[in-house]
């Protein structure tokens, strides 16, 4: 089984979709840090693109513990978050604060139970800080991944976020895309 956490309006065939928003393709309407509908050690891949940063650092640890619980030994976590180092570089390139406000603060409105809720990013990561929190919570073999080499490469999401927008050939990838393996 493969999970697509925090999928919002993005549907990837072959994945089980978990999110708190009201959308037809959501298989389980739940916060992505509550996977109680899944047994221990049953999931081979968790994919979460630009949703992990909505947890503060303490809640992020709790979410990772839940994800570790459901992943099979040697199961993979594929995680994408805004890359703080790239946002700094983007700001240095443009000198425009408004260019980084969206990926940095991530204001998102979602509808859940017919109520609109506004969410904001609660933290940011670079490769070193995200690697550390993953290793500290039971993962190893933390590496960057190329979205072009994934089974979900044909489903545009924030793991493919570039500046300038959609310039996937010459632009600056501003998404930190990391894979990590659950310790056996």
Image: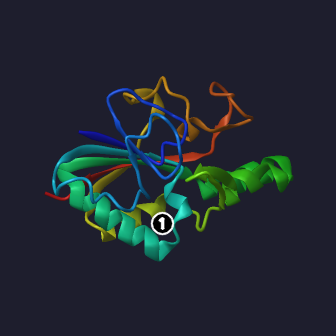
Along the horizontal axis of the image, is 165 left or right of 168?
right
Q: Residue at x 45, y 76 (%)?
A: 58
Q: Is residue 20 above or below residue 123?
A: above
**Quadrant where the C terminus is found in the figure:** bottom left
Seen at 16% across and 57% down, the residue is: 40
Residue 54 coordinates in the image, percent (x, y): 55, 62
Q: Residue at x 22, y 46 (%)?
A: 43
Q: Quadrant of the N terminus?
A: top left
Instruction: Give the secondary structure at mark 1.
Output: helix
Q: Residue at x 83, y 53 (%)?
A: 98
Q: Is residue 109 visible?
A: yes
Q: Which residue reaches farthest right?
A: 96
Residue 166 percent coordinates (x, y): 68, 29
**Residue tagged by mark 1?**
129
**Looking at the image, can residue 125 be seen?**
no
Check the image and tell me how it is coloured. rainbow
Quick one: which residue is furthest to the front in this view?
A: 114
Q: Nearer the viewer, residue 8 or 171?
A: 8
């Amino acid at each position: 089984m493969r999970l697509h956490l925090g999928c919002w309006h993005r549907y990837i065939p072959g994945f089980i979709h978990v999110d708190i928003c009201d959308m037809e393709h959501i298989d389980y309407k739940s916060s992505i840090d509550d996977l109680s509908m899944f047994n221990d050690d049953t999931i081979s891949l968790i994919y979460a693109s630009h949703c992990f940063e909505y947890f503060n650092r303490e809640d992020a640890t709790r979410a990772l513990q839940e994800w570790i619980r459901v992943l099979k030994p040697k199961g993979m976590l594929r995680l994408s978050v805004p890359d703080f180092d790239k946002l700094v570089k983007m700001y240095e390139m443009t000198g425009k604060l408004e260019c980084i406000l969206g990926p940095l603060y991530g204001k998102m409105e979602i509808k859940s139970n017919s109520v609109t809720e506004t969410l904001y990013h609660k933290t940011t990561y670079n490769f070193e800080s995200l690697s550390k929190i993953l290793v500290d919570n039971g993962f190893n073999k933390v590496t960057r991944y190329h979205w072009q080499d994934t089974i979900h490469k044909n489903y545009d999401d924030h793991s493919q976020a570039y500046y300038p927008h959609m310039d996937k050939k010459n632009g600056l990838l501003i998404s930190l895309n990391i894979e990590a393996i659950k310790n056996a």
